[in-house]
Image (cartoon, rainbow, N blue to C red):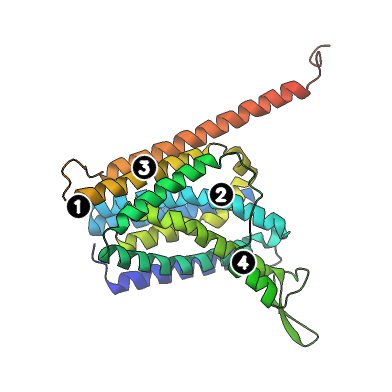
Amino acid sequence: MIVPVWAWIAVIGGLLVVLALDLWIVDRGEPREFSMKQAGAWVGFYVTLAVIFAAVLWITGGATPAAQFVAGYITEYSLSVDNLFIFYIIMTRFAVPKVHQHKVLLVGILMALAMRGVFIAVGAAALSSFSWLFYVFGLFLLYTAVQLIRQHGEDEDDFKENALLRWARRALPHTDDYVGSRVFVKIGGKRMVTPMLIVMVAIGTTDLLFALDSIPAIFGLTTDAFIVFTANVFALMGLRQLYFLLGGLLQKLVYISYGLAFILGFIGVKLILEALHSSGVSWAPEVPIWLSLAVIGVTMTVTTVASLVKARRDESKSREVTTPAGAEQG
């Protein structure tokens, strides 16, 4: 799909306006915790924006780019749920006050969007020049899928600081405690950063590491850089509110890693088959986008429902164990 420059400018400009409005509304007055009702409303708002964008793509470009966007959006949003576990660990490790967590997430995600934009541009250029990279991406996604299954059930509290975060903690003079929501302060005439900046760097750079599998995954659905970028934008825009909406529910999504592994494995196989098909291998079929969309949607629905059913059964068993015998009598 040929996308004019003004469309890129409109999307990026619109993104900045919406995020600025989001931050202004949330940060008016005294800092306060994000309520479930507020989080749900914002998640619905961002999902609605994605639906409207898909409809615009359908009208202007046809069904194929619209379906590619929807498949990419669902894939990126699903894979982003995995990010939320690590975001929760980071928030806990750095003891971020709940009233300031929404600001940390917003700035961290903005950093991630900027870095993902570079990643997407490089990836699109590389794939257009070196078709063999589709095999590399496909094998990498299969490897990642296997790793997700192998790591299922392991302790999630093993967050390791990356090189940039270690450098920031070592090189930047910083205060020991938070100073409200401020990122920079001046103490004794010396300009220092607060832990807020360190956490923002942690969120942004950690998300970029997750992009190492999510970006190749969406390139397996479409090589259109505009669709890849916008699917990432819309998925990450609602991620902050999803963090607060899910809350304790994150710990109940016990089967989510199996679902994500299946999706990554499916897209990995799809990449390899389509690369073979493009190379003239007659037996290698092309996987239609509607099939990809169906597999992704059904997989996430099944694993989410199965996780919640298991969580409810575990809670029921726990109540039965803790309820003394005969407690209901009398």
Q: Can you say which quadrant of the picture contains the C terminus?
A: top right
Question: In terms of depth relative to the viewer, which is nearer, 247 or 53?
Answer: 247
Above or below, comparing residue 102 to residue 187 in the picture: above
Query: Real-space Cα distance between discs 4 and 1?
Result: 42 Å
Q: Find numbered disc 2 in the image and state the secondary structure of the residue it sits on.
A: helix
Q: Do the residues labelled 2 and 4 touch (CB within 8 Å)?
A: no
Q: Distance between the residues labelled 2 and 1?
A: 44 Å
Please name the residue that numbered disc 2 is placed on: 40
- In percent of width and height, residue 9 lies at 36, 73
User: In which quarter of the view is residue 163 placed?
Assistant: bottom right
Q: What element carries label 3?
A: helix
Relative to 241, say whether 17 is above or below: below
Element carrying mark 1: helix
Residue placed most toward the observer, 25 or 186: 186
Q: Mark 1 points at which residue?
A: 278
Residue ID for mark 3: 266
Tag 2 near tag 1, CB within 8 Å: no
Where residue 80 sits: x, y (%)? 50, 52
Q: Is residue 315 visible?
A: yes
Q: Nearer the viewer, mark 2 or mark 1?
A: 1
Dot 2 or dot 1, earlier in sequence? 2
In this figure, which residue is indicated by the disc labeled 4? 200
Cα separation between marks 2 and 4: 23 Å
